[in-house]
Amino acid sequence: MYYINIFFLFSLLGHIIENFVYTKVDSGILYGLWTPIYGVGALTIIFINKYLSKYKLKWYIKVPPLFIISAIILGIIETIGGYYIEIVFGRVFWVYYDHFVPIGKYTSLKMMLIWGLASIFLIYFLMPIVNKFIKKVPNMLTEILIFLFISDVLYTFYKLSNFSFF
């Protein structure tokens, strides 16, 4: 349940950041209080860090590859997510043509650098705090969140999808 709880925590934090810090009107495609791309991003960073940790590198040696690998992979995930939402739901939530060095429609060098910095912040500052309580989340709460999330995904597909499989 650890990784599922991480997914929900960072999906919720992503929703809060996008809606209240950046005051976007619409943070994501789902109706609930989560923006799953942030949960996916956090898990990706955690798995990259776990992989790099196998090499027993000192933290100052591990930071550059964590930064670079996370920036590239999260840029790819952001691009895939943007095209997925556009193709399946016919919506465009972000476009980075006006950013520093746009890389296609849905990512840019600026955003990749932000994701690289976010990966360092996540691993070295947030995760030590999160790990103190995340394993204490009751399984029942996690199961309720799973049910609500799946319901939200199904409802979203039902309401917004360009495909007619319902």
Image: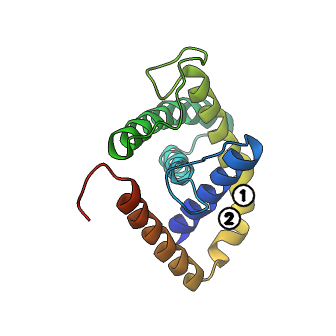
* Quadrant assignment, res 127: bottom right
User: Relative to residue 85, is residue 33 depicted above or below?
Assistant: below
Q: In x, y percent, where is residue 108?
A: 53, 23
Question: Residue type at mark 1?
Answer: Pro
Nearest the camera: 46 or 157? 157
In this picture, is 89 found above or below 60? below
Q: Please tell me which residue is depicted at 50% across the width and 45% down the height of the picture.
A: 48
Which image quarter holds the C terminus?
A: bottom left
Q: Label 2 belongs to which residue? A: 131
Q: Is residue 61 visible?
A: no
Q: For this view, does 62 lie left or right of residue 86?
A: right
Marks counted in the figure total: 2
Residue with the most extreme left position? 165
* Rendering quarter of residue 5: bottom right
Residue for point 59% across, 28% down: 111
Amino acid type assigned to the residue bearing label 2 in the image: Asn
Residue 154 showing in the rendered view: yes
Residue 140 percent location from the top left of the image: 56, 85
Horizontal relation, residue 154 to residue 57: left or right? left
Contact between marks 2 and 1 (CB within 8 A): the answer is: yes
Residue 73, compared with residue 128, is above or below; it is above
Residue 128 tag number: 1
* Secondary structure state at the residue bearing disc 1: helix
Which x, y percent locates residue 42?
57, 50
